[in-house]
Image: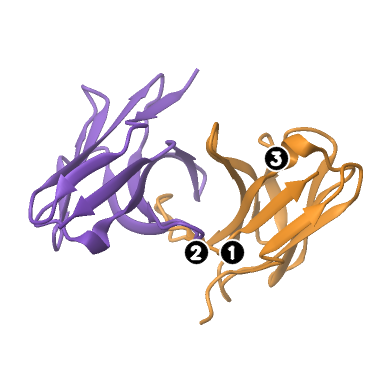
Amino acid sequence: SQKIEQNSEALNIQEGKTATLTCNYTNYSPAYLQWYRQDPGRGPVFLLLIRENEKEKRKERLKVTFDTTLKQSLFHITASQPADSATYLCALGSNTGTASKLTFGTGTRLQVTL
Amino acid sequence: DAGVIQSPRHEVTEMGQEVTLRCKPISGHDYLFWYRQTMMRGLELLIYFNNNVPIDDSGMPEDRFSAKMPNASFSTLKIQPSEPRDSAVYFCASSLASGGGSDTQYFGPGTRLTVL
């Protein structure tokens, strides 16, 4: 069966360092992958999209890589700040017609300390 | 735009009661999704609509769950009868199809359901 794994343990890093979050998947051939941020008591918020034919995407302090051979995506936040503390979800998407049907991982909680 | 609107934000009910969750998608969006989030299972897709028509309800756990979308600006998710294991946060999301099949989904704030 399809499986998406994100580190269930919280990631604690110091302000200013680079945070790296991992998303691994099995029995899945996604056409694209998205990363979302979720704060407590709120819905997920879209951050970045990367397609299967792309190796890397950047947006300000965020960088995503996508390795379809390793079946892995890495999500980096450079120069991390306490405001980056949240849960980050990866979501794999398949081309089902025109709908963006997503399968989400369980998320990794990031805590950035001063 | 106000974003995706969900009501109520919190619902506490007793086992066996009917529960109705409501969602207003972003105006102009043609896809609407219902998700359930728990600590154990994460965020799971229950059902999604395209232009008010249910496309895939394979995630609906059982017949106690039903969803409708009578028009482009309103959808409901109903649980009847409710059970304690239905306790979770239910999210509604909407998106605008761009043809590439990778559209961003915009989530509402969620409804926290507690079934006693």
Q: Residue at x 22, y 60 (%)?
A: A82
Residue B28 coordinates in the image, percent (x, y): 56, 74
Q: Which residue is denoted by mark 2 in the rendering? A: B96
Answer with left or right where residue A101 lies relative to residue A30. Answer: right
Residue A81 coordinates in the image, percent (x, y): 17, 60
Q: Chain of mark 2?
A: B
Element at label 1? loop
Q: CA distance from mark 2 to mark 1?
A: 6 Å
Is residue A19 visible in the rendered image? The answer is yes
- Badge 2 vs badge 1, beta-carbon distance below 8 Å: yes
Is residue A64 visible in the rendered image? The answer is no
- The hue of chain B in the figure is orange
Label of residue B57 in the image: 3
Of discs 3 and 1, which sits in the foreground? 3
Q: Which residue is denoted by mark 1 in the rendering? A: B30
Q: Residue at x 35, y 25 (%)?
A: A25
